[in-house]
Image (spheres, rainbow, N blue to C red):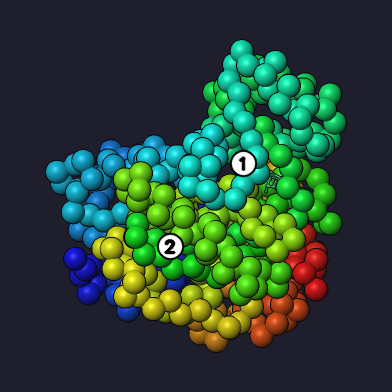
Amino acid sequence: MTLPEKVNILLLGGGGREHAIARSVAASPRCGKLYIAPGNAGTALCGTNVDIEAANFGAIKQFVVGHGIGLVVVGPEDPLVKGIVDFFADDAELKFVPVVGPSQAGARLEGSKDFAKAFMTRHGIPTAAYRTFGRGEAAEGKAFLATLKPPYVLKADGLAAGKGVVIPQTLDEAHGELDEMLGGKFGSAGSRVVVEEFLKGIECSVFVATDGENYKILPVAKDYKRVGEGDTGPNTGGMGAVSPVPFAGAKFIKRVEERIVRPTIAGLAAEKITYKGFIFIGLMNVGGDPYVIEYNVRMGDPETEVVFPRITGDVIGLFEGMVCGTLDGYELKVSGQVAATVVCTSGGYPGEYRKGLPVAGLDAVGGDLADGGSTTVFHAGTVRKGDAVVTSGGRVLAVTSLAGSMDEALAASYAAIEGISFEGMNFRRDIGRDLE
Ligand code: AMP
Ligand code: GLY
């Protein structure tokens, strides 16, 4: 099986990740019509936005059938965890429309931390020692905590919008936190809690594209999760990212491939889990040895805003390899340039923030990465209102630059941000600085 030479594509999602994917798709000579649901003011520059939420399967079906869509690309986890791939496979009208993403069974790698940990244990994949506790098992949980050294790591089993991990410093705090989590602090996501050993090291993210058998390892990236400079303050969806990552060189990636990527893909196949999508492996580098912190079943955001611009080959060919089972025949081409992205957020984020504020200065950012320009603004939380672009989310823009060195890429992104403004705009001034 192959995709047609020109293919109409529906991309689900509406963040910076989807703008970065849309830009690469639109640059492909094989791109027919590109639709993004729901998209944002930036994706509208690459294709046509469609007012459908990414997990509204009924409306997506109608659109796909009515618009001759030949490929669906899923950006966020929500539709995957809800089973969009199975929904397509089981529908008489949709079953010939390939979807980039894992089946619902595969999406459990992200949807259930307990499933992910048990999967890693079954397949000998290095990860922190752990046990899972349910309601009524607080006493056992506390006894297990007492066997670990501080700090402690507690994770709500289910999806908790990136907020389900707490790292208490003392045993007392850990006991209290376990009681609160099992008591419903994170709703049903926390009805089971994974308690695990704390790993000391530095984090990075490895992205893998797979057709279920073959795989390609995409450029490695590192994101900056805390809102404040020097990695302080609350966690966010991501304040910036860089690629490549100096401490994750060829030797480390080889270990990741041998100890993690291969057993993960072989494990999925052995368990008969259909997986034609991206695997995002959150890793801790512990003295040169990789340990899995978490799996996600999609690309990262803002990591995609530095990973996709470095893929210089045709990304529709990459998607084709993934959905058609021919990924071994795809040649992944990666730019030797360094990419950095700095995220501009709404004032108050990740707490409460205002929406609908006009964004000024976007037109002044010159050119596009593909046209030899060095900087592109990916929209993350924006909508168009008449002639204006206004804010619509916590993370508003991801300003990405490609250059010969990290310094140059960062300087270009920060220079571009100088010209951009909206009321309350915040950004970290230290992205990439810890890597020098
Ligand atoms: P997660 O939502 O699983 O990515 O966890 C959020 C953050 O908690 C990670 O990015 C790590 O910084 C931290 N974390 C999670 N698990 C561990 C662990 N076992 N040891 C140290 N830090 C961890
Ligand atoms: N940047 C982290 C994520 O996409 O989950």
Image quadrant occupied by the C terminus = bottom right
Q: Nearer the viewer, residue 186 or 60?
A: 186
The reply, left or right, for residue 207 in relation to residue 53 is right
The percent coordinates of residue 79 (x first, y second) are 40, 42
- Within 10 Å of the Cα at label 1, are there few (<14), some (14-19), or many (20+) other Cα atoms? few
The reply, left or right, for residue 229 in relation to residue 155 is right
Q: Nearer the viewer, residue 12 or 245?
A: 245
Above or below for 433 versus 238: below
The reply, left or right, for residue 9 in relation to residue 433 is left
The reply, left or right, for residue 342 in relation to residue 68 is right
Q: Secondary structure at mark 1?
A: loop
Q: Is residue 42 visible?
A: no
At 57% from the left and 25% from the top, the residue drawn is: 192
Above or below for 138 versus 55: above
The percent coordinates of residue 361 (x first, y second) are 66, 68
Mark 2 beta carbon near ligand 2 (under 8 Å):
no
The percent coordinates of residue 392 (x first, y second) are 58, 48
Mark 1 beta carbon near ligand 1 (under 8 Å):
yes
Q: Secondary structure at mark 2?
A: strand
Query: Which is in the foreground here, disc 1 or disc 2?
Result: 2
At 81% from the left and 45% from the top, the residue drawn is: 233
The percent coordinates of residue 429 (x first, y second) are 80, 64
Question: Which residue carries the number 1 mark?
Answer: 162
- Within 10 Å of the Cα at label 2, are there few (<14), some (14-19), or many (20+) other Cα atoms? many
Q: Nearer the viewer, residue 15 or 208?
A: 208
Q: Quadrant of residue 321?
A: bottom left
Disc 1 from disc 2: Cα separation = 23 Å
Question: Which residue carries the number 2 mark?
Answer: 209
Q: So how many labels did they put on this image?
A: 2
